[in-house]
Image (spheres, rainbow, N blue to C red):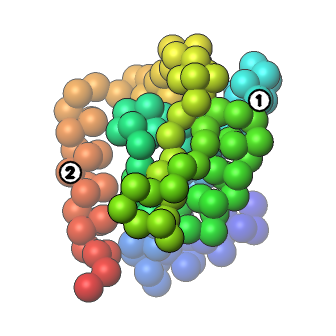
């Protein structure tokens, strides 16, 4: 109860603080729900690993830099994820054909099979968050989130 009183006082002084809090809290809940469901269902991958697999499936071979940008991860984090996917034989690195300092990451046959196997289940998990929302809700949410994102563009 005390935490809500404190949050209320802070929010009165900073009216938009509440929205940042709600956005952060919701993003955490979405990821926690997905990760817990992945574990319960025995997917043997994390939500972050899924994001990498799905991007590789959709966009084929990508450099680690391109993959990091698509997944919203920094380079060191993406490298760790790709290392784990490589150990699981779901992805592999190849030397870039024109830049020997960088790697191309692509799915193995096992990785492709994993994406095909899990896609319907992941869609069901992701759709849980969107229950009871209508098309107008989605349009407004998209507009708001894109505006926030653009407001914070790094120059």
Q: Nearer the viewer, residue 99 or 34?
A: 99
Residue bearing mark 1: 44
Q: CA distance from mark 2 to mark 1?
A: 35 Å
Does residue 144 lie above or below 49 as drawn?
A: below
Residue bearing mark 2: 143
- At horizontal 58% and vertical 49% (from top left) the residue drawn is 93
> Under tag 1, what secondary structure?
loop
- Category of crowding for the residue at label 1, using alpha-carbon neighbours closer than 10 angstroms: few (below 14), some (14–19), many (at least 20): few
Residue 48, image x, y percentages: 61, 46
Does residue 76 lie above or below 50 as drawn?
A: below
Disc with the residue nearer the chain's start (2 vs 1): 1
- Dot 2 and dot 1 residues touching (CB under 8 Å): no
Q: Nearer the viewer, residue 91 or 143?
A: 91
Residue 87 appears left or right of 151: right
The quadrant where residue 5 appears: bottom right
Check the picture and name the quadrant holding the C terminus.
bottom left
Residue 131, image x, y percentages: 44, 23
The quadrant where residue 10 appears: bottom right
Residue 75, image x, y percentages: 55, 68
> Under tag 2, what secondary structure?
helix
């Amino acid at each position: 109860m005390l935490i809500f009183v404190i949050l209320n006082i802070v929010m009165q002084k900073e009216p938009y603080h509440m929205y940042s809090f709600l956005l952060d809290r919701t993003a955490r809940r979405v990821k926690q729900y997905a990760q817990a469901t992945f574990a319960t269902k025995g997917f043997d991958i994390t939500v972050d690993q899924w994001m990498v697999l799905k991007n590789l499936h959709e966009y084929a071979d990508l450099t680690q830099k391109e993959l990091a940008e698509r997944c919203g991860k920094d380079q060191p984090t993406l490298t760790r994820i790709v290392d784990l996917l490589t150990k699981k034989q779901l992805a592999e690195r190849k030397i870039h054909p024109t830049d020997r300092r960088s790697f191309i990451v692509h799915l193995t046959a096992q990785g492709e099979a994993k994406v095909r196997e899990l896609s319907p289940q992941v869609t069901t998990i992701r759709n849980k968050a969107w229950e009871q929302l209508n098309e107008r809700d989605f349009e407004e949410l998209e507009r708001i989130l894109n505006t926030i994102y653009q407001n914070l563009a790094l120059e």
